[in-house]
Image (cartoon, rainbow, N blue to C red):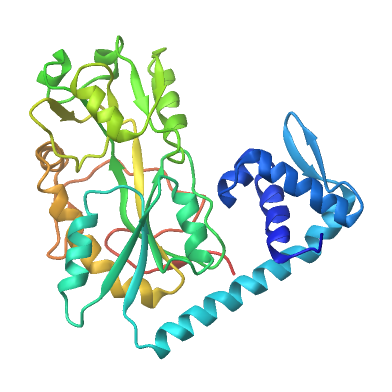
Amino acid sequence: MELEVRHLRVLCAIADHGSLHQAARQLGMAQPSLSTQLRRIEHALGGQLFLRTRAGCRPTPLGHAVLSRARPLVAELAAIVTEARAAAARAAGGTRLRIGATASRALPGWLRRLRTRVPRTEPTLQMDASANCLLRLVAAGRLDMAFVHEVEGSPLRIPPGLCLRVLVEREPQFVSLAADHPAAALPEVRLADLAGDRWMVDSTVDGEWDALCRVLREAGLDADMLHGDYLTAYSLAATGEVVTVSQPTARPRAELAIRPLEGDPIGVRLLLAARTEAELDHVYVELEEAYWEAAHQAPAYQEWLARSGTTAHPHGTPRPQSARVAQPPRTDVHTDTLRHRRPVTVGP
């Protein structure tokens, strides 16, 4: 077997994640296929590159030597591809935007605004439950930008060189439950009110499973936790089988209630990421307007905003009307405030 760049990417992914399972997920491969690929690479290079233990994979001395040469090659090739695609788009006079996003009610309004503005911009959309995956695609030049959420307590792995803009510093997460659930009659639901319920959470959403487990544990609850995508979770919640975490912009249905949790124990930060500040400037106002349009179409969120003393700027940015408890400063990445939307470049 001749060594190729794709093999170097495999080695870098395993080293970065310290896990064959996580590396396979990033690369879009099955874990057995990745294990076979690694064995072939090691055979071609003549030695073991990683030690496999119960704690994961760590490079051998030979692995470190190979990785020290592989990383610059992989990075340089990614830069060539990114620059070539950007040049080709400029030469064609194209205005197509490749957007990645985690789930959000703001997406339809954002895409509509981009399509109807002058000059017209034609966006394409790629959805993924993993914000980290989308950020890697932006860094690699396979997406132009990504609108993602970062679960509190589970910082995203921001690739070097990306520019970030914070749309909402802390968005509270609500709960979805059956309309005839006893707690649905309350304006705010305490976690104790759900002590007898099973929760369904999409564990493929980065940080969400861990966040809910932590919050329930801190509340002294030992609830049953089920894995499932959110379309299934909402369907089961409507029948009373489970309760589930919900974005505040979600709209209730006749059989489903959306309620805030007392004390807002779960929060997320909403971020827009791109490779340049100009790309952020190009689309940010439309995203901001679309988000707050969706927020004011969601009755439970509208009430929460009113209780918290939050209104909106003409462009949609929330402005506190009275003093509120400040969130602890973030240490994982430097960020903007909502009123000073200066982009931040992460990495060199």
Residue at image coords 66%, 52%: 13
Q: Residue furthest front?
A: 1
Residue at image coords 52%, 65%: 139
From this view, report whether residue 30 is shown above or below residue 227. Answer: below
In the image, 7: left or right of 193?
right
Q: Residue furthest right?
A: 46
Of residue 40 and residue 25, the one placed in the foreground of this image is 40
Q: Residue 346 appears at what percent x and percent y? A: 52, 64
Quarter occupied by residue 282: bottom left
Of residue 329 and residue 132, the one placed in the foreground of this image is 132
In the image, 12: left or right of 319?
right
From this view, report whether residue 122 is shown above or below residue 230. Answer: below
Q: Residue 94 appears at what percent x and percent y? A: 34, 83
Quarter occupied by residue 25: top right
Residue at image coords 37%, 74%: 279
Of residue 99 and residue 1, the one placed in the foreground of this image is 1
Q: Tell me if residue 19 can be seen.
A: no
Residue at image coords 47%, 30%: 210
Q: Residue 230 appears at what percent x and percent y? A: 31, 34
Quarter occupied by residue 107: bottom left
From this view, report whether residue 194 is shown above or below residue 31. Answer: above
In the image, 348: left or right of 50?
left
Q: Quadrant of the C terminus?
A: bottom right
From this view, report whether residue 150 is shown above or below residue 218. Answer: below
Q: Tell me if residue 274 can be seen.
A: yes
